[in-house]
Image (cartoon, rainbow, N blue to C red):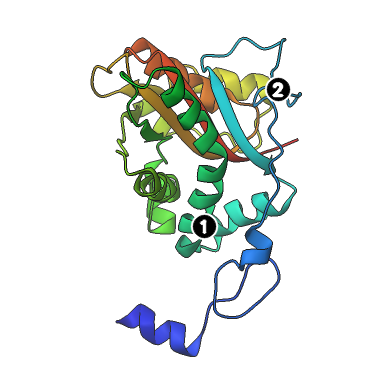
Amino acid sequence: MWSKILSFFLPEHCVICGQSGTSICPTCLDLPSDNSCLHCGGSLPCRDCILPWQSSVMIGWRDQQIGQLAEALKFAPRPTLARPLALTLARDLYPLIANATVKDPKSAQLPIIVPVPTSRRHKSERGFDHALLVAHNLAQIFSTECLPLLVRSKAAQSTTQLGSDRRRRHDQAQGAFVVNQPLDPTRHYILYDDITTTGATLQAASTALRHAGARHITVAVLAKSR
């Protein structure tokens, strides 16, 4: 009720162009894909990086509109952006899912969406888990499961990557995640995070999933820092 009252007196505006009545207008949401290697930033398929995932989807770069939207979701905060951002990711994930079904229609199952867990401090500051919110919307779009399989280790809960260089980020991410149950090696897992900088968090999270039994992992992010 209170949110409806606020929306009447303070209607939402597009975070990009300012159009009234929506958190993001259709024109500003019509974003081209700029899929690049999430580790080195080079073109895909990348021949230089050995990574613990089989495929990846990236909408664009952090200094582009998609980065502005991702940051507005969690820092403004604008939780109503979660659905349109999930739809944008789904657009680029659909071909990967469809191709897997065509290759092996008998054993093909819908993928499981796995969000990179947000720290307790950030959830408390924002009042919601921005990664889980987008992951839930993504699961709804594909009519599949969203499972918070990853848990941050106690050491990871107390560290921050803000201001850290590439080497320190990778050191901090080592052993940062554990998986809370054995995984089915026949399933396809889509690991979601909003913004990646060096790829250290994604590598640590994917490695944890692989150690728990995952064999087919796709990483999906909204944006990457240059």
Q: What amino acid is found at the position of numbered circle 2 in the picture?
A: Leu
Label 1 is placed on what type of residue?
Pro
Quadrant including the N terminus = bottom left
Rendering coords of residue 170 (x, y %): 58, 20
Please tell me how crowded label 2 is: few (under 14), some (14-19), or many (20+) other residues with Cα within 10 Å: few
Residue 169 horizontal/vertical position (percent): 60, 25
The CA span between labels 2 and 1 is 25 Å
Q: Name the residue located 52 percent from the left edge and 29 percent from the top edge.
A: 96
Q: Which mark is residue 44?
A: 2
On screen, residue 24 versus residue 205, left or right, reads right
> In the figure, 58 relative to 214: above or below?
below
Quadrant that contains the C terminus: top right
User: Residue at coordinates 27% horizontally, 17% vertically from top-left?
Assistant: 184
Residue at image x 36%, y 26%?
A: 153
Q: Secondary structure at mark 2?
A: loop
Residue 84 badge: 1
Q: Dot 1: what SS?
A: helix
What is the crowding at mark 1: few (fewer than 14 residues within 10 Å), some, or many (at least 20)?
Answer: some
Q: How many marks?
A: 2
198 up-or-down from 16: above or below:
above
Quarter location, residue 43: top right
Query: Where residue 183 sits in the image (x, y, percent)?
Result: 28, 18
In the displayed orientation, state which residue is furthest to the bottom.
Answer: 9
Q: Quadrant of residue 26?
A: bottom right
